[in-house]
């Protein structure tokens, strides 16, 4: 990478750190310039406006989320194994974000009633992740891992609820054992949807 590209990447890394801690609205060119030991004009040279910077931070966050959670999970076989992998890696990422913060969640609070490019980008990214979970849940039904009458959308809704509760208890209330409770909650949830006639279940019963 050339020097300009390296500088831009370093600015984005710092901007993501600040936005995770203070929210996207807490991200200012002045604060970022101070952290980078740069002038405001130097930061502006890489980003046309504060909104452009915020959008680039969102893209970086989404990219890292995909790299850590989505792409490794889809290497697992279709069905419940892939769904389990998605949730496990999601929880693992949350365990790191307890100290920093989740931009998807903080952004939802900041932009829930504020139309514009940032809200559109946020809803698109969260919608893409929910869509991936929904496809995975449907595949788990199609391959027989989950009961035929499973409502995939309801399952994804409940999975999302566990993650939101985890963020609330672990980051806001600092409740010990929150990560373990989320995992136990997911195991109980999946048990209610598992198909007792699935090939894996039949083999387990036979053994």
Image (tube, rainbow, N blue to C red):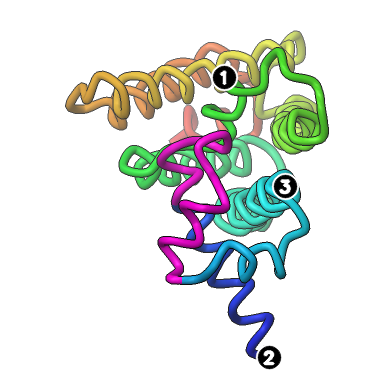
Residue 82 x %, y %: 63, 43
Label located before the other in sequence (3 or 1): 3
Residue plotted at (41% across, 41% down) = 21
Residue bearing the label numbered 2: 2
Prevailing secondary structure class for the magenta stretch in the rendered image = helix
Residue plotted at (41% across, 45% down) = 92
Q: Is residue 132 visible?
A: no
How far apart in space, not on screen, are marks 3 and 2 (Cα)?
22 Å
How far apart in space, not on screen, are marks 3 and 1 (Cα)?
16 Å
Residue bearing the label numbered 1: 109
Q: Residue furthest bottom?
A: 2
Q: Magenta residues?
A: 18-37
The answer to whether the residues at label 3 and label 2 have Cβ atoms under 8 Å apart is no
Q: In the displayed structure, does residue 92 sit left or right of residue 79?
A: left
Residue 204 x %, y %: 48, 33
Q: Which mark is residue 154?
A: none
Q: Secondary structure at mark 1?
A: helix
Q: Residue furthest left?
A: 176
Residue 105 x %, y %: 54, 27
Q: In the displayed structure, does residue 153 sit left or right of residue 99?
A: right
Q: Secondary structure at mark 3?
A: helix
* Quadrant (top left, top right, bottom left, bottom right) of the C terminus: top left
């Amino acid at each position: 990478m050339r020097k300009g590209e390296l500088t831009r990447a370093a600015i984005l890394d710092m901007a993501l750190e600040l936005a995770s801690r203070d929210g996207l609205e807490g991200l200012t060119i002045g604060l970022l310039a101070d952290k980078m030991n740069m002038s405001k004009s130097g930061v502006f040279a890489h980003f046309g406006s504060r909104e452009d910077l915020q959008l680039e931070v969102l893209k970086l966050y989404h990219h890292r989320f995909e790299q850590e959670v989505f792409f490794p999970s889809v290497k697992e076989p279709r069905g419940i194994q892939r769904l389990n992998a998605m949730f496990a890696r999601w929880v693992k990422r949350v365990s790191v974000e307890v100290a920093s913060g989740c931009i998807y969640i903080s952004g939802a609070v900041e932009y829930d009633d504020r139309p514009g490019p940032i809200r559109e980008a946020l809803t698109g990214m969260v919608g893409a992740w929910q869509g991936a979970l929904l496809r995975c849940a449907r595949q788990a039904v199609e391959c027989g891992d989950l009961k035929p009458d499973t409502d995939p959308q309801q399952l994804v809704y409940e999975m999302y609820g566990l993650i939101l509760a985890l963020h609330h208890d672990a980051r806001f209330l600092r409740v010990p054992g929150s990560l373990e409770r989320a995992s136990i909650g997911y195991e109980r949830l999946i048990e209610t949807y598992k198909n007792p006639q699935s090939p894996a279940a039949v083999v387990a019963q036979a053994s």
